Amino acid sequence: MRSTRPLAAFLATVPLLAGTGSAEADSESASADVMVGERVVTVRAEEVAPGLFFITGAGGNMGLSIGDDGVFLVDDQYAPLTDAIRQVIAKLTDQPVKFVLNTHWHGDHTGGNENLGASGTVVIAHDNVRSRMSAEQFESFWDRTTPASAPEALPVVTFSDAVTFHMNGLSIRAFHVAAAHTDGDTIVQFQEANVVHMGDVLFHYWYPYIDVSAGGSVRGTIAAVNAVLSMIDAQTVVMPGHGATVTDKAGLENYRDMLQDVADRIQSMIDAGKSLEEVQAARPTAAWDEEWGQHFMTPELFTKLIYGDLSGGL
């Protein structure tokens, strides 16, 4: 997601992705706390494969590769968290952050770009990410406008299809998936480690926000998930863009099944001429609500989102 609200306001309405408190630095985890308004946010890194970490905090989850070649970071959350993110990384390695790859344009994944770029980090993203960050964006579902990002926050290297980084003993393949969460989503595959970062193509046990105004779609999200499923196996570690823990192929299949079922149910009612109010009253998400409907995207909102996407009303 991207929000024009201050981070403190965001935290007042969205649950933190990690608890508060400190953890001792070791080879498997590290954490650092930062005050945001009157709340403490803990940025925490947990090792999921040798030299690879899953980082939670507030906003989009990050991925981290460390090694002799430097630090490769996937996304960078909100700007006020940059110092805490740096502290966590410093507990794990003394190497600099060489690259940060933005999985899409939303501010909870790109908010630290300017801070990191000022210290020499190279920011990379899909072509459409730079285009959207360069201009004012309007999200019709939330009825909100996001101003253009500062020039210093924009990705300085962009790609149209795929790019591979060879560092820390890994082939890190980043590839574009079309019309999924947005029109600029990137999946990041740490090939030899059998780890993949999904960005906001995957919300783990949250109903997802799909930014239709930015070219996203539920059918494109399903297609992107199916593409990743064809590349991974039962041992693959799957990092979500949102959600407190990593998952695996079975968890990704469950997410796909939820999206497919809800989309098909809503499409059949659209085809029958049902209004949004009638579709919401029919509760097409009911079978999934206990697991997936407990966060900011409530069952009613998710139904409205998918209805608007499939009917062309967004």
Image (tube, rainbow, N blue to C red):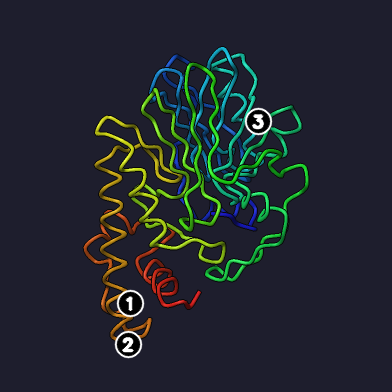
Residue type marked 2: Gly
Seen from the viewer's position, the closer of residues 227 and 260 is 227
Q: Secondary structure at mark 2?
A: loop
C-alpha span from label 1 to label 3: 43 Å
Mark 3 residue crowding within 10 angstroms, few (<14) / some (14–19) / many (20+):
some
C-alpha span from label 2 to label 3: 52 Å
Seen from the viewer's position, the closer of residues 182 and 304 is 182
Residue type marked 3: Asp
- Identify the residue at the far front of this view: 161
- Circles 1 and 2: CB atoms closer than 8 Å: no
At 34% across and 32% down in the image, what residue appears?
Answer: 237
At 66% across and 63% down in the image, what residue appears?
Answer: 137
Q: Indicate which disc, 2 or 3, sits on the residue closer to the N terminus.
A: 3
At 47% across and 21% down in the image, what residue appears?
Answer: 170
Q: Position of residue 166 (x, y in %)?
A: 54, 22
- Circles 2 and 3: CB atoms closer than 8 Å: no
- Circles 1 and 3: CB atoms closer than 8 Å: no
The residue identified by callout 1 is: 280
Mark 2 residue crowding within 10 angstroms, few (<14) / some (14–19) / many (20+):
few
Q: Which mark is residue 243?
A: none
Residue type marked 1: Gln
C-alpha span from label 1 to label 2: 13 Å
Up-down: is 250 above or below 260? above
Does 197 sit left or right of 272 as displayed?
right
Q: Which mark is residue 273?
A: 2
Q: Position of residue 25 (x, y in %)?
A: 49, 17
Up-down: is 23 above or below 33? above
The residue identified by callout 3 is: 83
Locate residue 180: give its quadrant. bottom left
Q: Indicate which disc, 1 or 2, sits on the residue closer to the N terminus.
A: 2
Locate residue 18: give its quadrant. top left
